[in-house]
Amino acid sequence: METLLNDFSPGLFVVSTILMLVLIALMVKFAWKPILESLNEREEGIQGALDAAEKAKIEMTNLQADNERLLQEARLERETMLKEARELKSNMIAEAESQAQEQANKMIVQAQEAIASEKKAAMAELKSHVAGLSLDIAEKVVRNELSNKDKQLQLVESMLAEATLN
Amino acid sequence: MKIVKQSFKFLVLAVLMFLPTSIFANDTAQDGGQISGKKQVEEYIVHHLKDSHDFNLFSYTNDSGERKHFGVALPVIVWTSQGLVTFMSSEFHHNDDGHVIVEKEGLKLAKIHSKIYELEKGATSVSFDAGHHATNAAKLLDFSITKSVVGVLLIGLLMLFWFSRLAKQYKKKQIPTGFGRILEPLVLYVRDEIARPNIGEKQYRKFTGYLLTVFFFIWILNLAGLTPLGFNVTGQLAVTACLAIFTLVIYTVSGNKDYWMHILWMPGVPIFVKPILAVIELVGAFIIKPFSLLVRLFANISAGHIVLMSLIAIMFTLKESLGVAGATGLSFVLSFFLLLIELLVAFLQAYIFTMLSALFIGMAVAEHDHDHDHEISSDVEDVRGDFI
């Protein structure tokens, strides 16, 4: 301990303190301050660039996702449109078919009705005709009866033949 | 290529510095002459560990038995009873045991073990007691430009040169080139691994300048101590004390309220313990912390120098038992490996000093998230608050 204290030089202590103070002041002013400032600036620059790149990347992925989504939507829309068209087509065909069927049925019914009414009319006419004819025949027969019995029979026979032919 | 050119420039500079060596190249001197015995080796090492008033590179004895020294004499500046006295150290003719008396302004000055003494009035030579202490001379306050001061100046200028160049490089480009590319990661290392984690994100900027200066100062001086220039600046108690006191002043001045509260009136302990803790904390803050800093650096570097020089001395001490080649080889191998370890120690001590400084500063400026209001009632409330 004594040698240590003996070795301690107060003069050197004072000199080195002064020198160190000057050195620290000079180093801070001319070296550390500008160096640390530049380093900070550079680090901030790098950080900024990295952040910007990251942001751009995220935007890019967003954009890609958007594109994908749009494409998907378009595809879906096309699909639905096609489906709708197909449905429309089949609907139309079915409708047309049913309409045609209906029309045809209607026409058939009308035709049948017409036939039936015609038939009725024909029957009625025939009936009236037959009735007239019968009356005529009866008149004639009656007349002939009154004149010639044979002739009257002949007439009836010929009339009947005619009627059968008719 | 540029680095090579620059180191060449530095070499030229170094050589130029030692050109005026002829000043005392022809001095006949009495420094003990050639070294051969164990005792001389020991004396030489002790002498080396001390600060020196001249920058001696090497000495040799020529054929005619004259002792020649190769180096530079440095100015001696001492505060005597007659005020400041300055002269060149060459006037002592390398004498270090008080036999050469230099007379200045009517004062008789002698150099004993690297210290300048002023003789009492009427005395013509230094007389010693049994313990080899001067009895009729007083030690002077010595402001000389000693070898350590030269080391501090040299390394200081070198640091200024290197780092101001690095600072200038940033004005033109983002990434430094040449030697700056080596310095930049070191600066970043100190900032990001020492200052930032120990002091904290908010405050570290204020102290980084000091920490960087201290780190490079200690490291480069430690490395300079391993060169044949033979600096032992960081092995001088005065220098390490100066550095430790800087750290002490910084953390004492910048300590916040919490820091002082923890020293003077420790929260969370019973009242009667508080004064005892205050004494312990005060001793810790003002004596133990700076002492741990200054003694660690001083002891590590001194020990390194002692062991390295002792291993080199194997060359002389084991010459007889191992032969010249054997002793030289052994010494060479051992000192080479120790040199490698010392290279590590040089960095490690700079790192530890800076690291501990940062830690002490960090402790003084740390902001506590929760206030230590450890009164019992409020403590219970706190605990309850935590659980609810």
Image: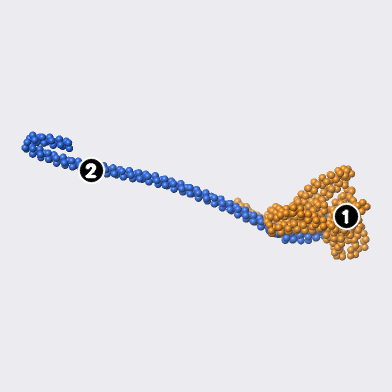
Chain colours: A blue, B orange
> Contact, CB < 8 Å: mark 1 with mark 2?
no
Q: Which residue is mark 1?
A: B69
Locate residue A92 relative to residue B179 in the image: left or right.
left
Q: Position of residue A65 (x, y in %)?
A: 53, 50
Separation of marks 1 and 2 at Cα, in angstroms: 159 Å
Who is closer to the viewer here, B105 or B8?
A: B8
**Looking at the picture, which amino acid does disc 1 mark?**
His
Which label is found at residue A117? 2
**In the rendered image, is residue B152 in sight?**
no
**SS of the residue at dot 2?**
helix
- Chain letter of the residue carrying label 2: A
| Image quadrant where residue B281 sits | bottom right
Q: Nearer the viewer, mark 1 or mark 2?
A: 2
Q: Report the front residue among B32 and B167.
A: B167
Using the rendered view, name the quadrant where residue B138 is placed: bottom right
- Output the chain of dot 1: B
Identified at 91% across, 60% down, the residue is B101
Q: Is residue B97 left or right of residue A143?
A: right
Residue shown at the point (84%, 60%) measured from the top left? B144
Q: How many marks?
A: 2
**Left-right relation of B118 to B278:** right
Percent of width and height locating residue A152: 9, 36
Q: Nearer the viewer, residue B90 or B7?
A: B7
Residue shown at the point (30%, 43%) measured from the top left: A105
Q: Is residue A91 above or below residue B240?
A: above
Q: Amino acid at mark 2?
A: Ser
Residue B378: image x %, image y %?
Answer: 63, 55
